[in-house]
Amino acid sequence: MLTKKGLFHAFALGTGLWSTLGWRGWTLCVSYLFLGQAVTKVKFAEKEKRGIAEGRGGRRGPENVWGSAATGLLCAVASVQGESFLGISSRVYVLAFVASLATKLADTFASEIGKAYGKTTFLITTFA
C-alpha cells in the first residue's frame, strides 16, 4: 500500500495521531488508508491501460500521506491543547479531524469509482 518513504512518513503520522487522539484517531486514519487502497484497486488494470491509474501501482508515497492527513493531524494536535484552543472547543477540533479524513476519503472514492465506471464527467461548479 505504501512506498518505503511512504511507510516512514505514515509511521510519523501514526505516532502523532496515537499521541494526540489515541487508538481511536489512529484507527480512523488506518481505516481511511485501507478503504482508499481498496477503491484504488477497483478496475485497476483497466485504469492503467487508459493511463489514468494511480502511479506506482497504487502505492502511496509521502506526498499522499501528508496530502491526505496533514490537516487532520493539525486538528488532532489542536484538540489536545486544552478545553479551548484559539477560542475553539477541543471537541470541534476532533470533529474537524474526522471531517478532514471523511472529505478526503469521499474524494478518493469519487475519483477512483468515477475513473472505473464513469462515462461522462462534469465540473460540479459549472456543470460543464
Image (cartoon, grey):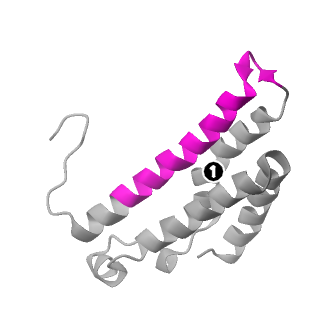
Residue located beneath label 1 in the image: 69
**Is residue 11 toward the left or the right of residue 119 in the image?**
right
Magenta-highlighted stretch: main secondary structure?
A: helix
**Is residue 119 toward the left or the right of residue 35 in the image?**
left
Q: Position of residue 92 (x, y in %)?
A: 65, 28
The quadrant where residue 50 appears: bottom left
Q: Which residue is drawn at 57% across and 69% down?
A: 60
Q: Residue at x 82, y 35 (%)?
A: 80
In this view, the residue in front, 113 or 5, is: 113
**Is residue 127 toward the left or the right of residue 44 in the image?**
left
Identify the image quadrant of the N terminus.
bottom right
The quadrant where residue 51 appears: bottom left
Q: What residue type is labelled 1?
A: Ala
* Relative to 74, residue 24 above or below: below
- Part of the protein shown in magenta: 83-110
The quadrant where residue 93 appears: top right
Q: Which residue is drawn at 55% across and 75% down?
A: 59
Q: Position of residue 102 (x, y in %)?
A: 51, 48
**Is residue 41 toward the left or the right of residue 46 in the image?**
right
Q: Position of residue 124 (x, y in %)?
A: 25, 40
Residue that extends furthest to the top in the rendered view of this protein: 87
* Relative to 18, residue 128 above or below: above
Q: Can residue 103 be seen in this view?
A: yes
